Image: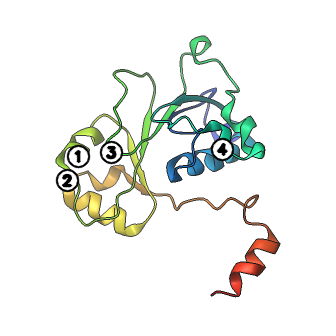
Amino acid sequence: MTREEGFDAPGVRWWGPLADESGYANEARIVLRGLRSLGFGTCIEPLSNSGNAGRVPEYYRKDLEPSFDPSLVTDFLNIFHLPWTSPWPDSFRGPAIWRSMFETAKLPSVWVERSYSVDEVWVPSLFNAQTYAAAGIPSEKIVVIPEPVDFIDFSGAQVARWSAFL
């Protein structure tokens, strides 16, 4: 939802890895770029980074910079994009979404407890939605948001080369 469609918070505060080569960080950079293209301001709380920012491709470097100062605003959407082993922030203000995934049929009980502190839980697949609901996370909190595709990394030449293997 863009600001013009009724989202009036000044931006999104993204909590999670961003400046490393992990799947979480890669997805974060793609989503943040998309949010910015829709007119949202973004601010990053880099958690669980491995310190490999120098290995991030150059065209992602601008995605590592915040576009607003969270100390100057009082309302923004928090998105927690954290592996389940990551520490959870002690406090935050505003609505909260937890972007989560787990490739098994059961969840640790601490995840169900964690879900109580957020408004929505975004998962990448119907399988994850069913697994999370079966574990006890209220189904009305679960939203399936498929993983994004990075069209910068997946250029036509690369897709053509890879299609030979399919």
Q: Secondary structure at mark 4?
A: helix
- State if disc 4 and disc 1 touch (CB < 8 Å): no
Mark 4: which amino acid?
Arg
- State if disc 1 and disc 3 touch (CB < 8 Å): no
At label 4, counting other C-alpha atoms closer than 10 Å, the crowd grade (few under 14, some 14-19, many 20 or more) is: few
Residue at figure coordinates x 33%, y 53% from the top left:
140
Task: For marks 1 and 2, give the CA distance.
Answer: 6 Å
- State if disc 2 and disc 1 touch (CB < 8 Å): yes
Tell me which label, 1 or 4, sits earlier in the chain.
4
Tell me which label, 4 or 3, sits earlier in the chain.
4
Q: Which residue is mark 1?
A: 112
Q: Is residue 90 left or right of residue 99?
A: left
Task: For marks 4 and 3, give the CA distance.
Answer: 24 Å
Mark 3: which amino acid?
Trp
Residue at figure coordinates x 45%, y 35% from the top left:
48
At label 2, counting other C-alpha atoms closer than 10 Å, the crowd grade (few under 14, some 14-19, many 20 or more) is: some
Q: Which mark is residue 55?
A: 4
Q: Which residue is mark 2?
A: 136
